[in-house]
Amino acid sequence: MKKATLLHYSFVIIAFLFLSLTGLAQQRKISGIVQESKNNTPLEGATISLKGQKSSTITGADGKFGIFVPNGKASLIVSFVGYETKTIVVGEGETSVLITLSQSTNNQLSGFQLYGPSQHL
């Protein structure tokens, strides 16, 4: 009886490990750099999102990022404050990208509100 139970648990553990590994094989990592288009300086804090998914990341001080995407083509949305948002398509065989963002032509604020403590004099 104990051998059958041990064999059953062993089979369940092996099946779970196998399914976990096949799930990982359905994704790949895309690495890249986001930089400014005029002088190619890296943009720290740019957001990279996988279109239609909740997966996202931000660039480091050197403009580098890494994000896991499903196998096949993937669309990445790249945004940064004061710059045009860009959507790029990463091909099936691509594992790295270089993304350049241009400053937005519409850098004007439509309005603002100032909040703070008030003092009555």
Image: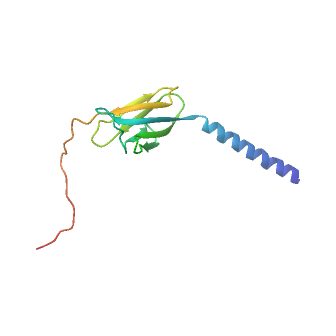
Residue closest to the eye, 58 or 69? 58
Residue closest to the eye, 37 or 20? 37
Q: How many dots with numbers?
A: 0
Residue closest to the eye, 32 or 6? 32
Viewport quadrant of the C terminus: bottom left
Please state the horizontal and vertical placement of residue 46, each as a whole percent of the image. 37, 42
Task: Name which residue lies at 45% across and 35% down.
Answer: 32
Residue at the outermost bottom position: 121
Task: Name which residue lies at 43% across and 39% down.
Answer: 64
Would residue 105 appear left or right of 43 to someone viewing this image? left
Residue at the outermost left position: 121
Would residue 11 appear left or right of 87 to someone viewing this image? right
Please state the horizontal and vertical placement of residue 56, each as a whole percent of the image. 44, 43
Task: Name which residue lies at 37% across and 44% down.
Answer: 44
Q: Quadrant of residue 60?
A: top left
Please state the horizontal and vertical placement of residue 47, each as a whole percent of the image. 39, 42
Please state the horizontal and vertical placement of residue 19, each as a whole percent of the image. 67, 40
Task: Name which residue lies at 42% across and 36% down.
Answer: 33
Colour setting: rainbow
